[in-house]
Image (tube, rainbow, N blue to C red):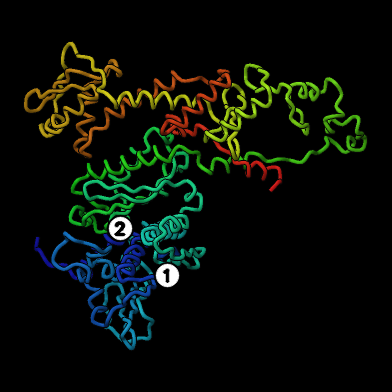
């Protein structure tokens, strides 16, 4: 077989298969070029989901005729020179434009600020046309038509126009969050126009444009730094979660990335606070020395590699957990909105027209309280202290509980309630419903608490603190269990032996390719020690952390807490209910149970008044 040199066109088409996977890939590359050119306004127009037309217009610095001729040749770039150690731009490979031109009809118009006229160049399926002068505004217009017409096989793998248009929208959303000072406009006959006005340095305002105004009310600011790596951004409270991961955004030095290390750390940070199958909402920005991160992992530049992945993962998990402990113990505002939607008052309608015709005041159950006959229930309510429209008096007025009523002078009760409402965020317990839900009155509304879920979280946090505050009790195996492993895995495990010992797992080296397990955590009882050790070895090989054992212990603690907490159906006294509320206020993470469900829902007084049409 004779070796021969491939043609330049074929080389570009092969490269295009890696760089330009779909119209959204082309859109990403062109938007990155516009941002690198210093644009403050970027307009994107599409047709046919980007397959028929993709046009990106910017007001950046533009290109001269000589630069334009080089821009469509492979590995020609203005962004790096001799090294990949200090990449500070989004693009740097010099592959995007020639790759697009090899599989589509590409036209570029550009003009610099000081040029009297613009220039235009076209590449049609790899065939390059000469640069020619053309009228143009300052900046650059890149127009891509008939994407993949030169490689029809690729068209067979495209999704519907709607799906491809949605993928381009997602690219624009991510770029918009990363660069809030740039105005983005996305339009075309295949979509409704999306316009994102520039918000300057107000990152949260831009995020609210993309994710919705609810995120602003449910976001916690993140700002932490460790060993020169800084993490900033916003994370949603645990009760503000979604059914997919589309509202999770990560950026490294301004570059949108899809990195499995970051997503794994995000899941770990929200462990035990979000239900299975639900995803937190978060926007994370990592600022790191370019020499400590490799962005040249894949031609699409969506993956990165950190020199110290353990440092980055620990920073993300620690910063988010600290922020959640500080500000995360609150119900999502969307919970109140859902509660409002559940209340759909319907006007009273008589059962039939005949009933309306025979209606009389004496026969109607809907009339003023003072006209109710004895035995109607209202007299008994009056005796129990539920007078409506009657001035408070010094007579006894009960606190309603699940176990009956205890008459307390109204003046003393109101004073105690006022003090509780003023002092405590979760207010004062007023009633227990269905032996499971505590209703508390706050200064500006009411709170409904799931007593079992709330107490379950409190017990779990107590047990978890005990785990972290002192070494876990270990049980010595009568006969050590020998686990055969590759030598590299044994080296990694022995390096973590002291940390594992604090968690109750005692291991020793047993020859070059084996580990002897001498102790296991007493909390876990009888267990598969070999399986646990192999799992830890896999984690250390991939993440350089051994969190599996700690997670297993926490899972056991969560299970024990679930079975040892206040059960649904138990009737509680007022002092018990108030004690539970006070514990919730003092315990981090009490806004969610161990399974991630909310422990309480808050309804503001303004919402209640809106239900009754009073505002």
Q: Nearer the viewer, residue 256 or 29?
A: 256
**Residue 429, position in %: x, y?**
58, 27
Of tags 2 and 1, the one toward the viewer is: 2
> Which element carries disc 1, helix, strand or loop?
strand
Q: Position of residue 424 (x, y in %)?
A: 52, 33
Label 2 secondary element: strand
Q: Is residue 301 visible?
A: yes
Q: Please tell me which residue is depicted at 77% across the width and 41% down the height of the picture.
A: 347
Q: Quadrant of residue 409?
A: top right
Q: Residue furthest left?
A: 511
Q: Residue at x 43, y 39 (%)?
A: 328
Q: Is residue 300 left or right of residue 485?
A: right
Q: Is residue 336 above or below residue 93?
A: above
Give the residue pinned by disc 1.
43
- Residue 100 lies in quadrant: bottom left
- Left or right: 404 in relation to 453: right
Residue 265 x/y as whole percent: 31, 41
Q: Is residue 514 left or right of residue 160?
A: left
Q: Residues within 10 Å of mark 1 (few under 14, many from 20)?
A: some
Please say if the residues under marks 2 and 1 sit with CB atoms less than 8 Å apart. Answer: no
When the figure is inspected, residue 600 is found, relative to residue 205, above or below; the finding is above
Judge by depth and name the residue closer to the eye, 494 or 118.
494
In three-dimensional space, the C-alpha distance between marks 2 and 1, rounded to whole angstroms, equals: 19 Å
Measured as percent of width and height from the top left, residue 362 is found at 91, 30
Q: Earlier in the sequence, mark 2 or mark 1?
A: 1
Residue at x 64% of width, y 25% of height: 412
State whether residue 36 is above or below residue 563: below
- In the displayed structure, 370 sits above or below 79; it is above
Look at the image and tell me in which quarter the N terminus lies.
Answer: bottom left
What number is the disc on residue 255?
A: 2
Residue 163 visible (yes or no): no
Picture disc at residue 316: none
């Amino acid at each position: 077989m004779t070796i021969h040199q491939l043609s330049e066109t074929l080389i570009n088409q092969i490269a295009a298969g890696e760089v330009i996977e779909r119209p959204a890939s082309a859109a990403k590359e062109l938007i990155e070029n516009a941002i690198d050119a210093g644009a403050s306004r970027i307009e994107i127009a599409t047709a046919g989901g980007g397959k028929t037309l993709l046009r990106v217009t910017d007001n950046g610095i533009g290109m001269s005729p000589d630069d334009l001729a080089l821009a469509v040749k492979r590995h020609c770039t203005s962004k790096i020179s001799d090294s990949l150690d200090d990449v500070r731009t989004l693009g740097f490979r010099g592959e995007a434009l020639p790759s697009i031109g090899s599989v589509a009809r590409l036209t570029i118009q550009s003009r610099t600020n000081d040029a009297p006229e613009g220039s235009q160049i076209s590449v049609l399926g790899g065939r390059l046309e000469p640069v020619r002068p053309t009228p143009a505004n300052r900046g650059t217009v890149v127009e891509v038509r008939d994407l993949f017409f030169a490689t029809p096989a690729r068209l067979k793998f495209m999704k519907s126009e709607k799906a491809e248009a949605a993928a381009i929208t997602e690219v624009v959303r991510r770029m918009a969050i990363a660069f809030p000072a740039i105005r983005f406009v996305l339009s075309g006959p295949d979509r409704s126009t999306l316009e994102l006005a520039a918000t300057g340095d107000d990152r949260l305002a831009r995020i609210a444009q993309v994710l919705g105004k609810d995120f602003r009310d449910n976001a916690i600011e993140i700002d932490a730094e460790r060993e020169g790596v800084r993490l900033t951004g916003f994370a949603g409270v645990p009760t503000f979660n979604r059914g997919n991961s589309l509202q999770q955004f990560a950026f490294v030095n301004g570059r949108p990335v899809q990195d499995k290390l970051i997503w794994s750390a995000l899941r770990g940070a929200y462990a035990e606070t979000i239900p299975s199958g639900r995803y937190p909402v978060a926007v994370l920005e990592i600022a790191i020395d370019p020499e400590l991160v490799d962005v040249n992992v894949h031609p699409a530049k969506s993956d990165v590699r950190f020199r110290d992945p353990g440092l980055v993962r620990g920073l993300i998990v620690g910063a988010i957990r600290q922020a959640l402990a500080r500000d995360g113990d609150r119900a999502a505002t969307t919970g109140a909105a859902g509660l409002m939607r559940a209340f759909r008052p319907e006007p009273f309608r008589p059962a039939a027209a005949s009933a309306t015709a025979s209606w009389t005041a004496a026969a109607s159950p809907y009339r003023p309280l003072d006209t109710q006959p004895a035995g109607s229930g209202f007299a008994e309510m009056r005796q129990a202290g539920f007078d409506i429209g009657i001035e408070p008096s010094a007579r006894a007025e009960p606190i309603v509980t699940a176990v009956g009523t205890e008459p307390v002078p109204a003046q003393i009760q109101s004073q105690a309630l006022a003090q509780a409402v003023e002092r405590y965020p979760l207010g004062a317990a007023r009633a227990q419903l269905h032996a499971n839900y505590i209703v508390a009155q706050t200064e500006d509304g009411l709170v409904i608490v799931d007593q079992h879920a709330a107490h379950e979280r409190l017990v779990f946090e107590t047990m978890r603190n005990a785990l972290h505050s002192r070494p876990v009790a270990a049980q010595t195996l009568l006969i050590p269990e020998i686990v055969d492993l590759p030598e590299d895995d044994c080296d990694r495990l022995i390096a973590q032996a002291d940390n594992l010992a604090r968690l109750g797992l005692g291991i020793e080296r047993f020859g070059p390719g084996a580990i002897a397990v001498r102790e296991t955590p007493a909390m876990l009882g009888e267990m598969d020690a070999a399986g646990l050790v192999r799992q830890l070895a896999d984690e250390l090989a991939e993440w350089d952390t051994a969190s599996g054992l700690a997670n297993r212990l926490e899972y056991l603690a969560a299970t024990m807490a679930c079975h040892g907490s206040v059960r649904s159906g138990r009737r509680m006294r007022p002092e018990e209910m108030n004690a539970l509320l006070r514990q919730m206020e003092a315990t981090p993470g009490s806004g969610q149970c161990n399974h991630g469900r909310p422990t309480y829902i808050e309804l503001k007084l303004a919402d209640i008044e809106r239900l009754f049409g009073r505002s």
